[in-house]
Image (cartoon, rainbow, N blue to C red):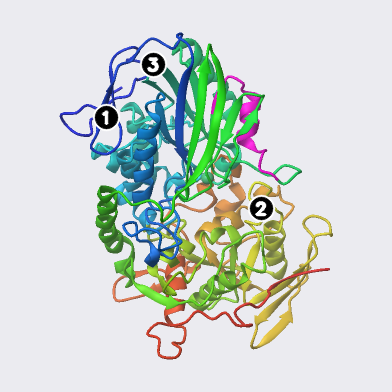
Amino acid sequence: MKPIDPRGNKSFAVASSKTHTRREVLVSATIGAVFVLHGKPAAADGKKTLTILHTNDIHSNFVGMSPEADYTPFSLNDDKTRGGLARLATLIAARKAAREAQGPVLVLDDGDYSNGTAFGAATRETGSELQLLFRMGFDATTFGNHEFDFGPDGLGTSIAVAARAGRTPPIVVSNIDLSKDDPTLVDLQRLTKEGVIRRHLVIERGGLRFGIFGLLGKEAAIYTSGGAASFPDAIETAREMVTILREKEKVDVVICLSHGGLQAGKDGRFTEGEDVDLAKAVPGIDVVISGHSHTEVHEAIIVNGRTPVVQTGKYGENLGELVMTLDGGKLTVESYRLIPIDDTIAGDHAIANEIDKLKKTVTEVVFAPRGYSIEQPLAMTSQDLPNTFTDIAAGTLLANLVTDAFRKATKADIGLNANGAMRAGLTPGKSGVVTVYDVFAVAPLGAGAVDSTAGSALVTAYLTGQEVKNILEFLLIDNPVHPGETFPRASGMRFRYDLSRPRFDVVTAIELGDFDRGYSAIDITGKDARLYSLTSSLYVGKILVAIPNYTKGKLFLVPKNKEGRPLTSKVEALDDPRHGTPDLLPPPGTMDQSSVAMATGNGPVREIKEWQAVMDYLRALPVKNGSELPTIPVDARAAEVRAIKAG
Ligand SMILES: [Zn+2]
């Protein structure tokens, strides 16, 4: 393997699984500082203390949220924003300095580092998530499902940008199969050869040998647009990795970066899920750094009486600090805590400058072509529009706003979304101003169908009343790993549902119309073949077209065009969606263009992006009393309940 050489004269290397064993290792630490550590034989000499600092699911949250306008990392204690990588960098450096006297410190990330904000939208061009992780001193990260949102080729491109700049931490992913002869895998295959992506990693530090491997969980793999890449069984892979790391590499501590997730047990506490099952099934793992489910674990979950499973929540809102001791081969958790990243922490100037520079690129790449810029004020809000998934009533304002925007953009009968596809809420903060950055974070996911720039395209299909019902039935099945996330949200339609009824038959009525015109019922029994147009994001649309597959045919639907012809002939020949979803739709550019909502600007014909629809909608709202910006409505019409629960 070729060591990554980020800074010319200073060599950056990690002990490779193949070539290095006991040699001196140079390890990059905080920005500007390089520590020389002398590898010693594994600890046999009494008690050792080690510290693991960790994050997960940062999702390109480079600045604190929200609102973006309130984030001032250089003026302390005057805003309520959380996160921000300039603050995280300061905190990591401070905690490293504080802990290093006690023993080695590792800094690890658990994946889904990209995609979620305007910065993530430009990741293919900048590879900036990895570059910033590197500059903050991260020792390793792994892949989450969202790393593949632009396909394996998009991911390969972004890593290559960071690797060319010599600024990426090793990416450790053990259960990925990149062996297929496919052009979309070329970059990832090359990066694997170069050792940027690796199955496992050994870091020798402070007289201890740490073995690190990474897994993408089974459920996360369902949501992964891996294309020609596939993800072998996580638990089997873990057993193999533990054997290699223990027997061949003779490591002292085995750490798994597992992007598998946690879920609530019967008592409502998040102490179950794939990352816990993994620790139970593979006792050779000493530490599980968890991610994917965005769970704040305030107390380490201890499995088999010894293995801690820890997770920090999401969006860089916390840094986890796990302290353990190793005594005669026995590892014990000394302490665990989440440190909030908030306005008590002063930002790191170098990181903040880097992020400021990136803003320009983001505007050029993502927003300018559609007439926006990253920090542009869009509207005023007088109250919170949260994106809470479990409180359906509280989330209604935002859901109505977003789905109304879809319907206005395409003039479809129905605008449809799912709770979890709205990735952030809107909040007034100190000024009440909502910017382009804030709104992009509501609808950041996916890419286009014809135009491959960031952000989902809006897509429209024609469906019968029964097929619309089938979509609602599917979305109303709750996924315990992501409670409330699939809950359906609509505009131009309201529906009644009764969860006490049999699965796949909980929807009792669907009506089309709106608050002002009133509603009228449509047939949902299949007797009426009339077609209704339905607009969603391509991101959600990919899941909708796979419903027959997910439900093994119990819920059918065939997305059609206006004339009633099926949109794609590939639908019947779908692969098992567990093996990745991109085959669910034809490759970019080959899709039936009449199904994609198009806008004609001054340039060539192009798609309407999901985020663009929401921004255009906000800009067209009425301006109230003396304000320069439109005001987001929060009245009865705005809060209209469109999902009516029986009982
Ligand atoms: Zn994830």
Q: Residue at x 65, y 63 (%)?
A: 488
First in sequence: mark 3 or mark 1?
1
First in sequence: mark 1 or mark 2?
1
Between the C-alphas of marks 1 and 2, the distance is 41 Å
Q: Quadrant of residue 476?
A: bottom right
Callout 3: helix, strand or loop? loop
Callout 1: helix, strand or loop? loop
Identified by mark 1, the residue type is Ile
Dot 2, how many residues are within 10 Å of its Cα: few (below 14), some (14-19), or many (20+)?
some
Residue 61: % across, % down: 41, 53
Front-lying residue, 309 or 72: 72
* Drawn side of residue 26 relative to residue 381, left or right: left
Residue 414: % across, % down: 60, 73
| Residue 443 visible within the image | no
What is the span of residues highlighted in magenta in the rendered image?
A: 269-287
Q: Which mark is residue 207?
A: 3
Q: Which residue is mark 2?
A: 483
Q: Residue at x 67, y 24 (%)?
A: 304
